[in-house]
Image: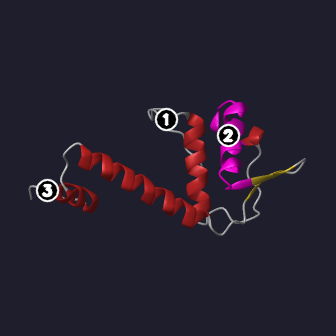
């Protein structure tokens, strides 16, 4: 379910966080479904349990999961998660486009880059 890319420069806890977010947003993990225990997932991935706990804390902070004391972690039932994620992506895209325009990248180059072509085609 979760694969770690050791060549990736992002920290392992961020990779775990992002993988779980995508599983939740794509409906692979359903609302109120129990998440794997910290200990079991750490053993399965051969990583430190503190790393998993940090990823779970981040997921909880962002509203993707919730904790039930003594029971474990569960997928949140917040139907607005996908909407919030899309809004964040669009904001990030606007910020990147603004920075690109400030350094001289043209609107045409941006559009071509976004749709997958080259500006000089």
Which residue reaches farthest left?
Answer: 120
State yes or no: residue 45 in magenta. yes
**How are the residues colored?**
secondary structure
103 left or right of 68 in image: left
Q: Residues within 10 Å of mark 1 (few under 14, many from 20)?
A: few
At numbered mark 2, what does the secondary structure look like: helix, strand or loop? helix
Residue 89, how many percent across, how many down?
46, 57
Residue at 89% from the left image edge and 48% from the top image edge = 69
What residue is pinned by disc 1?
A: 10
User: Could you give the CA–CA distance between mark 2 and mark 1, rounded to whole angstroms?
Assistant: 20 Å
Q: Which mark is residue 76?
A: none
Q: Nearer the viewer, mark 2 or mark 3?
A: 3
Q: CA distance from mark 1 to mark 3?
A: 30 Å
Residue at disc 3, secondary structure: loop
Question: Does residue 57 lie above or below 95 as drawn?
Answer: above
The answer to the question of whether label 2 and label 3 lie on touching residues, with beta carbons closer than 8 A, is no
Residue 80 position (above or below residue 95): below
- In this rendering, which labeled residue sits more in front, label 2 or label 1? 1
Query: Which quadrant is the C terminus positioned in?
Result: bottom left
- The secondary structure that dominates the magenta segment is helix
Numbered disc in front, either 1 or 3: 3
Q: Secondary structure at mark 1?
A: loop
């Amino acid at each position: 379910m979760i694969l770690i890319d050791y060549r990736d420069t992002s920290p392992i806890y961020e990779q775990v966080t992002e993988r779980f977010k995508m599983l939740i947003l794509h409906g692979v993990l359903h609302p109120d479904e129990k998440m794997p225990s910290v200990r079991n997932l750490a053993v399965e991935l051969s990583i430190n349990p503190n790393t998993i706990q940090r990823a779970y804390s981040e997921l909880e902070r962002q509203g993707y999961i919730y904790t039930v004391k003594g029971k474990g972690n569960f997928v949140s039932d917040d139907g607005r998660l996908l909407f919030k994620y899309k809004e964040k992506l669009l904001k990030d895209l606007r910020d990147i486009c603004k920075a690109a325009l400030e350094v001289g990248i043209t609107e045409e180059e941006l559009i071509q880059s976004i749709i997958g072509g080259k500006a000089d085609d």
